[in-house]
Image (cartoon, rainbow, N blue to C red):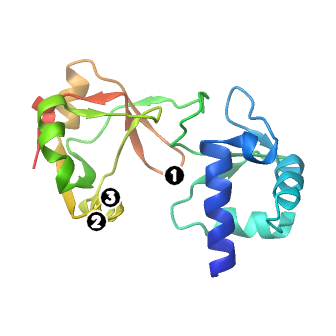
Amino acid sequence: MNDKHKQLGKFISLVLRHNPGTIGIKLDANGWADVNELITGMNRNGRRIDKTTLIEIVETNDKQRYSFNEEQTKIRANQGHSVSVDVELAERIPPEILYHGTADRFLEVILQTGLQKQNRQHVHLSVDEKTAISVGKRHGRPKVLKIKAASMHQAGHKFYLSTNQVWLTDFVPAEYIEI
């Protein structure tokens, strides 16, 4: 993906996950935006894009952040919303262990209070340490937390798997976290 597409992708993420009003559009209850309204709103905002470019961004995004409906008339972010939407996630049984990347400066609080979703709808977890390290680097010196997901699930915590293979849960109590 070229730099221009990467920048457009980041802006699309802002719009579809956090602030659709930035370009004057609305998301439906399930997080879908009308593709034509998204394109028109982005162009009105000075972000030049057409449907071909949008399709390329969706298909080549390394994190597979977005999905189209079958007709490609609607688009949504797969997870990571701070706005209230229901992306229709099915509850799943997690693997034994999942990982969460964070910065070392947050460790003390996390080990006391657990992992909280903060301003998002869920806590994000990955199946591999490499992804967790990558996430942690965005916030400072990375630390990988090992989450006892199967034990959490057995204790009644719900887990969901997003379209782009990110594991989601509402909260991770401190007793299920190892460094």
Which residue is nearer to you in this view: 107 or 32? 107
What residue do we see at 62% from left, 51% from top?
A: 14
Residue type (three-letter) at the residue carrying disc 2: Lys
Considering only order in the chain, which callout, 1 or 3, is on the residue closer to the N terminus?
Answer: 3
Q: Quadrant of residue 50?
A: bottom right
Q: Is residue 47 left or right of residue 159?
A: right
Q: Report how far apart the C-alphas of labels 3 and 1 lie in the structure.
A: 22 Å
Name the element at disc 1: loop
Picture layout, residue 173 above or below residue 38? above
Q: Report how far apart the C-alphas of labels 2 and 3 lie in the structure.
A: 15 Å
Q: Is residue 61 left or right of residue 44?
A: left
Name the element at disc 3: loop
Considering only order in the chain, which callout, 1 or 2, is on the residue closer to the N terminus?
Answer: 2
Residue type (three-letter) at the residue carrying disc 3: His
Q: Which residue is mark 3?
A: 139
Q: Which residue is mark 1?
A: 164
Q: Could you say where residue 103 lies in the image, as x and y percent from the top left? A: 24, 56
How crowded pointer 1 is (Cα within 10 Å; few <14, some 14-19, many 20+) is rated as some
